[in-house]
Image (cartoon, rainbow, N blue to C red):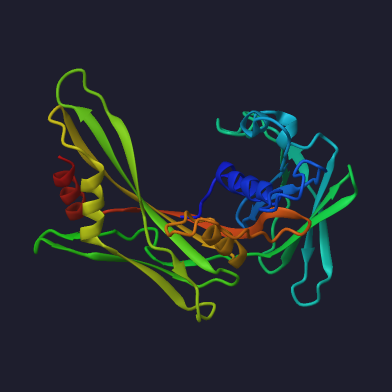
Amino acid sequence: MFRITFRKLFFVSAVAASSLFYSCSTDIDLLESYKPITVVYGLLNVHDTIQYIKINKAFLGEGNALLMAQQNDSINYKPGELSVQLQKISPSTGEVLQTIVCDTTTQILKDDGLFYNPYQILFKTTASIDENSNYKLLINRSVDGALISAVTPIVNTVTVVFPQPNSLVSFYNGSSQTFRTVTLKWKHAANANIYSASLRFTYYDSLVVSPFTKDTVKLEMNLPDVLAENITVGDEELIAINGESFFSFIQSSVHPNANVYRFADSKLEIFLSAGAQDLNTYIDVNKPSIGLIQEKPVFSNVTNGTGIFSSRWTTKLTNAMDAATVTKANQILN
């Protein structure tokens, strides 16, 4: 899945940016001069009521880098050092149709980690995003007058074909005791380059002796990504979800416990995401290396900075599983 948090993508961006300072040559003093590098992470979503863009700075200095990362002024710009705008641009003519000034917020706290927390500065706007336009990010850095920019198309709304809101999901045929395949279907949307999906199955733990409790457990099953290659907007894309694989996933995720009775929720949540081409490339480049070659290329679509500015579309479908599927799930849970 590429529903990635600010923290994860910023960590990748910061590491990538800091790598720009290093060289194999021994003829250069790496700390001879300071070169400011702005790190950007922003994913516009046409259905979000608020768009957030995270903008930080890479750092380099003498001493322990891990300790420096814990300092606010090492990674965050001071108030007033950046001015941030979004420009709505016509894809056909390049004309600027609207200029949106982004405000700042510190209300979304950052989780613990390598970098300074819990407070973080995010740039935001409540302006609506037009899926038929491109958007250009403009960042003016007042300390040196540098202009950082990036452009993205907007992933259009994805039409889900199956499951529909009131349709039942069935992974098991109780009468024949055979597994069924559920096919997640949607229509290819403009500017979508990759699709990613997952299932969230919920069950409850209850002690079989007093005191009775009911703990909620959620399991998330990631599905294979689908690349939109050689397909026309409006054509159907799909992911086939094998019933046997679904129940095997549940079985591998729980452990027998004679003191606990487990029972499945009939609700199944399905998450579907679509990402633009630059987002797909960024995630693909930053996947863990599995071969002997560990050095990875650095991908960024940010001019005079580093990071990623792109777009995505996301939805959550909530459907009920039929009685045979729930019964089979309960057998596996216990």
Q: Residue at x 66, y 53 (%)?
A: 24
Q: Residue at x 53, y 81 (%)?
A: 232
Q: Residue at x 72, y 33 (%)?
A: 62
Q: Residue furthest top?
A: 211
Measured as percent of width and height from the top left, residue 327 is found at 16, 49
Whether residue 50 can be seen here: no
Measured as percent of width and height from the top left, residue 281 is found at 57, 64
Measured as percent of width and height from the top left, residue 329 is found at 19, 48
**Quarter placement of the C terminus:** top left
Up the image or down, 174 lies above or below 15; here it is below
Tell whether 206 sits left or right of 75. left
Q: Residue furthest front?
A: 27
Measured as percent of width and height from the top left, residue 60 is found at 72, 39
Tell whether 26 sits left or right of 197. right
Q: Residue furthest left?
A: 176
- 317 or 133, nearer to the observer: 133
Up the image or down, 132 lies above or below 207; here it is below
Count the marks. Answer: 0
Up the image or down, 73 lies above or below 244; here it is above
Residue 186 picture quarter: bottom left
Residue 57 picture quarter: top right
- 251 or 334, nearer to the observer: 251
Whether residue 165 can be seen here: yes
Tell whether 33 sits left or right of 171. right
Q: Residue at x 56, y 68 (%)?
A: 192
